[in-house]
Image (spheres, helix red, strand yellow):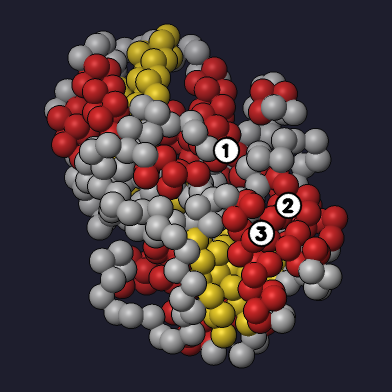
Amino acid sequence: MKRSRMLATAAAGAVLLLAAACTSDVPPGGAAAPTGAPATSAPAAGSEFFDQAEHDRQLALRDQTAQGPADQPWMQMLEPEMRDTARYATQGPHHVCFSNASVDNPWRQVGWTTMQAEVDLHRDEIANFTALDAGASDDKQISDIQQLVGGDCDALIVSPNTTATLTPAVEAACGQVPVIVFDRGVDTDCPVTFIHPVGGYAFGATAAEFLAGEVGQGGKVLALRVLPGVDVLEHRWAAAERIFAARGVNVVGVEFTENDTATAKSIVSDYLQREGQINGIWMDDGTAGVAALEAFEDAGQPLPAISGEDQQQFLEKWQAEGLTAQAPTYPTFQWRTAVVAALQVLRGEQVPSEWILPQPTINGENLSQYLQPGLPPLHYALCGCQQMPDFPARWGA
């Protein structure tokens, strides 16, 4: 669990909430202006965000077969090391508490809706579910955790706003209730389990391998990133730039969009004017994928190969236009897993000390499996919610 600042969320807007934090471990100046710096050379070694061992582990995990039911990926796990939780077993029904970083982006909103639906599936075991939203503030979340632990919670689920700053509050909570951490990590091993998909290196590498294969050696790729200085996004690019360099891909630019679709479209338009042709778009987050493609359409250019994410509007565009595309994912179904894990701990059942969830990739062959018509444009397909009560209405359809 103490894995060198490994995790933040895959959701693009999450980085915006990080930038808004007061006492945060997000580097100052996170919302820097676009660099405009091409990255055609080999990546520099020794980045504070790059961990070779973790990089190698995540890339290897992509080839592992997850344990657990194939039709319930939120219950699956990769290379689990089980932890005994007998000492936490208590008689139910329980009071489960949740300290949430925020719901200020579509990825987190889909996850939060899914988590509440999961709670409703266990009303025989969960008498009360108390959730506090920190509104993307580290200070607020520290206070929230203290408030929840001071109440009568039987278990505490935490989705940290940032890693290092929230660690002391989580460590203090561990001494009083079983703590389940998911999505972003903390710099301590004290939580009973830490739930997350494979991770950012795997996300970035998968997208880069796809694009390198599509554009070929010397092909031009524009990389669109959200913000600098956020670990999981740095991991995605760190893995991608190594693959592009090794495969001889011409990365014509690495630009930050601040998760703004208008900015993304403007950047792509500028590069099309400058370069004349771009063969591929790599993205560390798929939110601006449709906007990037619109820039090609406005310029009368053929649509490029593109890596996006499992957001509904991108998948619909992909199917409608017959895109050459791929969508690595950071599944929102992990919000279900957090509730499941809390109940397993309170039953005294074993759980993985690090619960690594599968991280499926959407490609041309399985797109129709994941795209369900009629859902909101900002819905995330990997919610694992399709068979839950009140789907799809509860998710905004």
Quadrant including the C terminus: top right
Whole-percent x and y of residue 275? 66, 81
- Quadrant position of residue 351: top left
Of residues 55 and 193, the one nearer the viewer is: 55
Query: Foreground mark, 3 or 1?
Result: 3
Q: Which three-letter amino acid code belongs to the residue tagged 2?
A: Leu
Left of 106 or right of it: where is 296? right
Choose the circle earlier in sequence order: 3 or 1: 1
Left of 116 or right of it: where is 57? left
Left of 44 or right of it: where is 34? right
Marks 3 and 2: CB-CB under 8 Å?
Answer: no
Q: Which residue is mark 2?
A: 315
Give the number of marks: 3
Q: Which three-letter amino acid code belongs to the residue tagged 1?
A: Pro
Q: Which residue is mark 3?
A: 265
Residue under the point 71% across and 40% down: 377
